[in-house]
Image: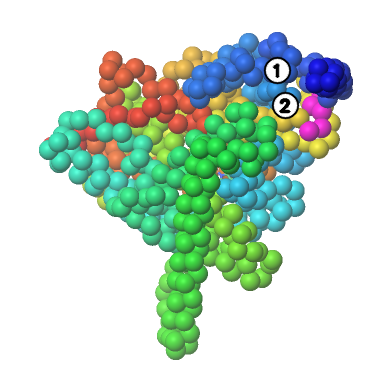
Amino acid sequence: MFLVIFGLAVTFAFFFYLKWENSSYVRTIDLIPGPPKLPLFGNALSIPLDTHGWLQKVSVEWPKKYDHFYRGWFGFKGYIDISCPLLVEEILSSQKFIDKGSDYDMLMPWLGEGLLTASGNKWRKRRRLLTPAFHFQILDNFFDTFNKSANILCQQLGASQSDDSLIGKEIDVFPYLKRCTLDIICEAAMGIQVNAQQQDSEYLYAVQRFSTVLFEYFVSIWSLLPRWMYFMTKKGKEYQKYLKIIHDFTSKVIRDRKKEMELEEAAKESKDEQEAARESEFEPRKRRAFLDLMLIAAKEVNLTDTDIRNEVDTFMFEGHDTTACAAVWFLYCMATHPDRQELVRKELDDVFGDSQRPCTIEDATKLKYLECCIKETLRLYPSVPHIKRLNTEDFVLSNGYKIPAGASYSIHIYALHRNDQLFPDPLAFNPERFQLDQSAGRHAFAFVPFSAGPRNCIGQRFAMYEEKVIFSTLLRRFRFTYDTAKHGPALPCADMLLKPHHEMPLKITPLVRD
Ligand code: HEM
């Protein structure tokens, strides 16, 4: 009896598989060039499990082999990988392709339907609501915060150099940078001071561990099974523990800001009207922190506490981890290219002389070579290595291939930026390629670290200024070096963001001015 049932089950599964294999969905995707697939597994067995190996396979080897347009199968899940600028432009610049792929579902328990993950009209309304909080006309309001946090970062790194046990030793700079960018996003966007640089942050550790656990879950067999089964495992319990720490932290940020706003309102009401009018006449136009906008909007439009928390989680994650990744790779590129580091320092000397005064928006605009170095870093090490889209209808690309409804496709920023037809000698760190004479004529969608089109990064100008302030402060005080002979080249690995595979040990030498 058992054998009969087993035989029927196998026959049924076999027919189901044949039917699936011959469906128009599978046949359409299989018309796209790609690595040979195995029954049931697709290409899953050719993809290394470690995050660096994974990146090499899907972002370097296959894009090169299939001319920057290929398909792959992860079991029954098909995906199309795009890294040629014409197709990247076609997708990113269109209003039709704004919905994210099912891969973002893994972020849902954390970010809910925040700006990054929301679709359709919900996304449009949120984007309209939040855009003023990062408008370029109010960006100079953030400079005090950038400078203050950059100075604390210098003190922390400097203190490590006056600690006898650490003098002349290498320091893993990544945790310092994460704490600094967390302080900045909390104060600039949330109007709240968390002092992550001065005290241990449980939130930061939880974000770090949660990102790793989430990525491991996503590329494992567990992601194909009901989630309650995963939650019974040790890793599943870790997932829930860190998620709770993250949500508790962001809920506290919201509660604290609400309380502060109530106090500010009460203080305003207690001032007599004439005094208030006099003050507002002399006060510069103040920006509204992003969180304040949300809290005010909550009263006018229908925003629940969960909606607000989803946005806060989105901005906390997008606003600090992305910039910290960009910063750690920038320091690595500087440390491994001392000649370029000196050129940046020369530009800093031209703008600041030997002063350690704060960097203003006017200074930042003058730092053109620094900007080239930041861009070249983002080319080689884009914080967000790939982004995904999903369509509910079939569509045909300009290269004639059809993407069937429901298939996930990704824009592979990492592979695009290392495409040797766009960037000759693509692995070389060469900031000069972003100088005007060398970048003229390059395809507008060859370099998209902040994505592009309607769904681009809302915080890109904020991030560029933030980086300029941090680096101009750091490089006026310290020289950075990396011991390649000892550590080998630093390897990137991608979970959701592009991070160093291991630590980033840099030697930091305080500069002595004559
Ligand atoms: C170097 C730093 C940064 C990089 C490289 C970066 C990159 C990106 C990229 C590639 C996307 C598109 C993601 C996708 O389509 O899946 C994105 C979206 C987004 N970024 Fe950034 N980002 C950075 C900093 C920031 C900062 C500082 C903030 C907040 C102040 C921010 C907030 C966001 C948000 C909210 C979205 C979603 C926008 C939408 O879908 O409408 N990012 N970012």
Could you tell me if residue 55 is visible in this image?
A: yes
Question: Which quadrant of the structure image shows residue 406?
Answer: top right
Q: Main secondary structure of the magenta part?
A: loop
Q: Which residue is mark 1?
A: 42
Q: Residue 67, image x and y in percent?
A: 66, 14
Do the residues bearing badges 2 and 1 touch, measured as CB atoms within 8 Å? yes
Q: Amino acid at mark 1?
A: Gly
Q: Is residue 264 above or below residue 371?
A: below
Residue pictured at 60% horizontal, 63% vertical:
305
- Look at mark 2 in the image and give the residue it sits on: 77
Q: Is residue 219 left or right of residue 289?
A: right
At horizontal 66% and vertical 70% (from top left) the residue drawn is: 300
Query: How far apart are the alpha carbons under marks 2 and 1?
Result: 8 Å
Question: Mark 1: few, some, or many residues within 10 Å (few <14, many ≥20)?
Answer: some
User: Which part of the image, by quadrant, shows the N terminus?
Assistant: top right
At 45% from the left edge and 40% from the top edge, which residue is drawn?
208
Local SS, label 1: loop
Q: Quadrant of residue 337?
A: top left
Q: Which residues are magenta?
A: 402-406
Which of the two residues, 422 or 169, is positioned nearer the viewer here?
169
